Image (tube, helix red, strand yellow):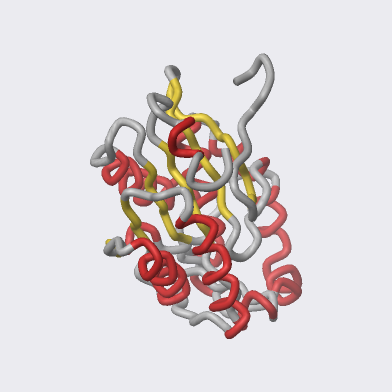
Amino acid sequence: MTGPGAETGRKGRGRRLILWRHGQTSWNVERRFQGSTDVELTEIGVGQARRSARLLASLKPDAIVASDLRRAADTAAELAVLTGLEVTVDEGLRETYAGVWQGLTHEEIIARYGDEYAAWKRGEPVRRGGGELETEVADRAAPVVLRHAEKLPEDGTLVVVSHGGTIRTTIGRLLGLEARHWESLGGLSNCCWSVLGEGVRGWRLLEHNAGTLPEPVLGDDD
Protein backbone atom coordinates (compact mmCIF):
# COMPACT_ATOMS: atom_id res chain seq x y z
CA MET A 1 0.00 0.00 0.00
CA THR A 2 1.15 3.56 -0.59
CA GLY A 3 0.31 6.72 1.28
CA PRO A 4 -1.64 7.14 4.53
CA GLY A 5 -4.30 4.71 3.38
CA ALA A 6 -1.77 1.90 3.66
CA GLU A 7 -2.46 1.66 7.37
CA THR A 8 -6.06 0.62 6.79
CA GLY A 9 -4.91 -2.26 4.61
CA ARG A 10 -2.49 -3.37 7.28
CA LYS A 11 -5.06 -4.02 9.98
CA GLY A 12 -4.38 -7.41 11.50
CA ARG A 13 -1.35 -7.98 9.29
CA GLY A 14 1.24 -8.07 12.08
CA ARG A 15 4.09 -5.82 13.08
CA ARG A 16 6.42 -4.22 10.56
CA LEU A 17 10.11 -3.31 10.74
CA ILE A 18 11.63 -0.67 8.49
CA LEU A 19 15.43 -0.87 8.56
CA TRP A 20 16.67 2.44 7.16
CA ARG A 21 20.28 3.16 6.22
CA HIS A 22 21.74 6.59 6.97
CA GLY A 23 22.37 9.30 4.38
CA GLN A 24 25.55 9.95 2.45
CA THR A 25 28.84 10.80 4.17
CA SER A 26 32.13 12.01 2.71
CA TRP A 27 33.66 8.60 3.42
CA ASN A 28 30.89 6.94 1.40
CA VAL A 29 31.83 9.13 -1.56
CA GLU A 30 35.53 8.33 -1.11
CA ARG A 31 34.72 4.61 -0.68
CA ARG A 32 36.39 4.53 2.73
CA PHE A 33 35.44 1.81 5.18
CA GLN A 34 33.66 3.67 7.97
CA GLY A 35 32.85 0.96 10.47
CA SER A 36 32.35 2.49 13.91
CA THR A 37 34.14 5.74 12.97
CA ASP A 38 31.75 8.63 13.67
CA VAL A 39 31.50 10.40 10.30
CA GLU A 40 28.78 13.02 9.80
CA LEU A 41 26.39 13.46 6.90
CA THR A 42 27.25 15.56 3.88
CA GLU A 43 24.80 18.23 2.69
CA ILE A 44 23.61 15.70 0.12
CA GLY A 45 23.15 13.17 2.91
CA VAL A 46 20.98 15.58 4.89
CA GLY A 47 18.87 16.15 1.78
CA GLN A 48 18.51 12.41 1.26
CA ALA A 49 17.38 11.99 4.86
CA ARG A 50 14.77 14.73 4.53
CA ARG A 51 13.37 13.30 1.32
CA SER A 52 13.16 9.76 2.67
CA ALA A 53 11.71 10.97 5.96
CA ARG A 54 8.76 12.52 4.11
CA LEU A 55 7.99 9.14 2.56
CA LEU A 56 8.45 7.12 5.73
CA ALA A 57 6.39 9.54 7.81
CA SER A 58 3.37 8.68 5.65
CA LEU A 59 3.61 5.10 6.96
CA LYS A 60 2.82 6.47 10.44
CA PRO A 61 5.57 4.69 12.41
CA ASP A 62 4.97 4.03 16.08
CA ALA A 63 8.60 4.23 17.22
CA ILE A 64 12.10 5.12 16.01
CA VAL A 65 15.35 3.60 17.26
CA ALA A 66 18.76 4.53 15.88
CA SER A 67 22.47 3.91 16.13
CA ASP A 68 24.18 6.56 18.24
CA LEU A 69 26.69 7.36 15.48
CA ARG A 70 25.95 10.81 14.08
CA ARG A 71 25.21 9.76 10.53
CA ALA A 72 22.39 7.50 11.73
CA ALA A 73 21.14 9.66 14.60
CA ASP A 74 20.96 12.74 12.36
CA THR A 75 19.10 10.76 9.70
CA ALA A 76 16.62 9.57 12.32
CA ALA A 77 16.16 13.14 13.57
CA GLU A 78 14.66 14.15 10.21
CA LEU A 79 11.89 11.57 10.65
CA ALA A 80 11.38 12.57 14.27
CA VAL A 81 10.70 16.18 13.22
CA LEU A 82 7.88 15.05 10.91
CA THR A 83 6.33 12.44 13.19
CA GLY A 84 6.77 14.01 16.61
CA LEU A 85 8.30 10.74 17.84
CA GLU A 86 11.31 10.62 20.13
CA VAL A 87 14.38 8.83 18.79
CA THR A 88 15.82 6.18 21.08
CA VAL A 89 19.55 5.77 20.39
CA ASP A 90 21.34 2.51 21.07
CA GLU A 91 25.02 1.78 20.47
CA GLY A 92 24.07 -1.83 19.76
CA LEU A 93 22.98 -0.62 16.31
CA ARG A 94 26.42 0.76 15.38
CA GLU A 95 28.18 -0.36 12.24
CA THR A 96 30.67 -3.23 12.38
CA TYR A 97 33.94 -2.39 14.11
CA ALA A 98 36.60 -3.23 11.53
CA GLY A 99 39.87 -2.39 13.25
CA VAL A 100 42.66 -1.36 10.88
CA TRP A 101 40.31 -1.41 7.87
CA GLN A 102 38.54 1.68 9.14
CA GLY A 103 39.50 4.77 7.18
CA LEU A 104 41.01 2.78 4.30
CA THR A 105 39.63 3.00 0.79
CA HIS A 106 38.32 -0.08 -0.98
CA GLU A 107 41.46 -0.18 -3.12
CA GLU A 108 43.73 0.06 -0.07
CA ILE A 109 41.92 -2.82 1.63
CA ILE A 110 42.28 -5.02 -1.45
CA ALA A 111 45.98 -4.15 -1.77
CA ARG A 112 46.87 -4.73 1.89
CA TYR A 113 44.37 -7.36 3.02
CA GLY A 114 43.31 -9.05 -0.21
CA ASP A 115 43.21 -12.60 1.16
CA GLU A 116 41.18 -11.52 4.18
CA TYR A 117 38.78 -9.59 1.96
CA ALA A 118 38.33 -12.54 -0.40
CA ALA A 119 37.63 -14.90 2.52
CA TRP A 120 34.97 -12.52 3.81
CA LYS A 121 33.32 -12.36 0.40
CA ARG A 122 33.28 -16.17 0.28
CA GLY A 123 31.20 -16.15 3.45
CA GLU A 124 33.92 -17.30 5.82
CA PRO A 125 33.91 -15.93 9.39
CA VAL A 126 36.49 -13.15 9.22
CA ARG A 127 37.46 -10.48 11.75
CA ARG A 128 37.94 -7.76 9.17
CA GLY A 129 40.87 -5.65 10.27
CA GLY A 130 40.90 -7.51 13.56
CA GLY A 131 37.40 -6.29 14.38
CA GLU A 132 34.01 -7.91 14.88
CA LEU A 133 32.65 -11.02 13.24
CA GLU A 134 29.38 -10.48 11.37
CA THR A 135 27.71 -12.90 13.77
CA GLU A 136 28.85 -10.74 16.69
CA VAL A 137 27.26 -7.71 15.05
CA ALA A 138 24.00 -9.65 14.72
CA ASP A 139 24.33 -10.81 18.34
CA ARG A 140 24.23 -7.20 19.55
CA ALA A 141 21.95 -5.58 16.96
CA ALA A 142 19.14 -8.09 16.42
CA PRO A 143 18.12 -8.18 20.12
CA VAL A 144 17.84 -4.37 20.11
CA VAL A 145 15.43 -4.53 17.17
CA LEU A 146 13.39 -7.34 18.70
CA ARG A 147 13.22 -5.63 22.09
CA HIS A 148 11.72 -2.52 20.53
CA ALA A 149 9.47 -4.54 18.22
CA GLU A 150 7.94 -6.27 21.23
CA LYS A 151 6.70 -2.89 22.47
CA LEU A 152 4.71 -2.24 19.29
CA PRO A 153 0.95 -2.66 18.98
CA GLU A 154 -0.04 -5.80 17.08
CA ASP A 155 0.03 -4.02 13.71
CA GLY A 156 2.62 -1.37 14.62
CA THR A 157 5.64 -0.12 12.69
CA LEU A 158 9.17 0.35 14.01
CA VAL A 159 11.79 2.35 12.09
CA VAL A 160 15.37 1.24 12.79
CA VAL A 161 18.00 3.70 11.55
CA SER A 162 21.37 2.02 11.24
CA HIS A 163 24.17 1.08 8.82
CA GLY A 164 24.45 -1.12 5.76
CA GLY A 165 26.44 -3.96 7.31
CA THR A 166 24.50 -3.98 10.55
CA ILE A 167 21.18 -3.97 8.74
CA ARG A 168 22.24 -6.87 6.50
CA THR A 169 23.38 -9.03 9.41
CA THR A 170 20.26 -8.18 11.40
CA ILE A 171 17.99 -9.12 8.51
CA GLY A 172 19.90 -12.38 8.05
CA ARG A 173 19.51 -13.22 11.73
CA LEU A 174 15.80 -12.35 11.86
CA LEU A 175 15.10 -14.40 8.75
CA GLY A 176 16.97 -17.38 10.20
CA LEU A 177 19.51 -17.52 7.37
CA GLU A 178 22.89 -19.15 7.92
CA ALA A 179 25.60 -16.52 8.36
CA ARG A 180 27.46 -17.63 5.24
CA HIS A 181 24.39 -16.65 3.19
CA TRP A 182 24.00 -13.13 4.59
CA GLU A 183 26.13 -11.70 1.80
CA SER A 184 23.41 -12.80 -0.65
CA LEU A 185 21.37 -9.89 0.68
CA GLY A 186 22.54 -7.02 -1.50
CA GLY A 187 23.72 -3.77 0.02
CA LEU A 188 21.56 -0.75 0.80
CA SER A 189 22.02 2.58 -0.95
CA ASN A 190 22.24 5.68 1.22
CA CYS A 191 18.86 6.45 2.81
CA CYS A 192 17.18 3.37 1.32
CA TRP A 193 15.49 0.80 3.50
CA SER A 194 14.30 -2.76 3.85
CA VAL A 195 10.93 -3.84 5.22
CA LEU A 196 10.27 -6.95 7.28
CA GLY A 197 6.75 -8.07 8.09
CA GLU A 198 5.61 -10.43 10.81
CA GLY A 199 4.07 -13.62 9.47
CA VAL A 200 2.79 -16.82 11.03
CA ARG A 201 6.24 -18.44 10.56
CA GLY A 202 8.28 -15.46 11.69
CA TRP A 203 9.70 -12.42 9.93
CA ARG A 204 9.49 -12.10 6.14
CA LEU A 205 11.49 -9.81 3.85
CA LEU A 206 8.90 -7.69 2.04
CA GLU A 207 11.07 -4.94 0.52
CA HIS A 208 14.84 -4.60 0.10
CA ASN A 209 16.91 -1.53 -0.84
CA ALA A 210 13.69 0.40 -1.41
CA GLY A 211 13.46 4.14 -1.94
CA THR A 212 9.74 4.33 -2.60
CA LEU A 213 6.73 3.32 -0.55
CA PRO A 214 5.82 -0.38 -0.35
CA GLU A 215 3.30 -1.76 -2.81
CA PRO A 216 1.01 -4.70 -2.01
CA VAL A 217 1.95 -8.17 -3.27
CA LEU A 218 -0.88 -9.18 -5.59
CA GLY A 219 -0.69 -12.87 -6.27
CA ASP A 220 -0.62 -16.33 -4.76
CA ASP A 221 2.31 -15.49 -2.44
CA ASP A 222 0.47 -12.71 -0.59
**Residue 179 at x, y percent in the picture:** 54, 38
Residue pictured at 32% horizontal, 44% vertical: 143
**Residue 25 at x, y percent in the picture:** 58, 78
From the viewer's perspective, is residue 44 above or below residue 115? below
Q: Which residue lies furthest to the left in this view?
A: 151
Residue pictured at 55% horizontal, 73% vertical: 34
Q: Is residue 94 found left or right of 175 in the rendered image? A: left
Q: From the viewer's side, name the closer residue of 175 and 214.
A: 214
Q: Is residue 134 found left or right of 147 in the rendered image? A: right
Q: Is residue 107 found left or right of 205 in the rendered image? A: right
Of the 4 image quadrants, the one containing the C terminus is: top right
Residue pictured at 56% horizontal, 34% vertical: 205
The image quadrant that residue 207 belongs to is top right
Q: From the viewer's side, name the closer residue of 194 and 85.
A: 85
Of the 4 image quadrants, the one containing the N terminus is: top right
**Residue 16 at x, y percent in the picture:** 43, 38
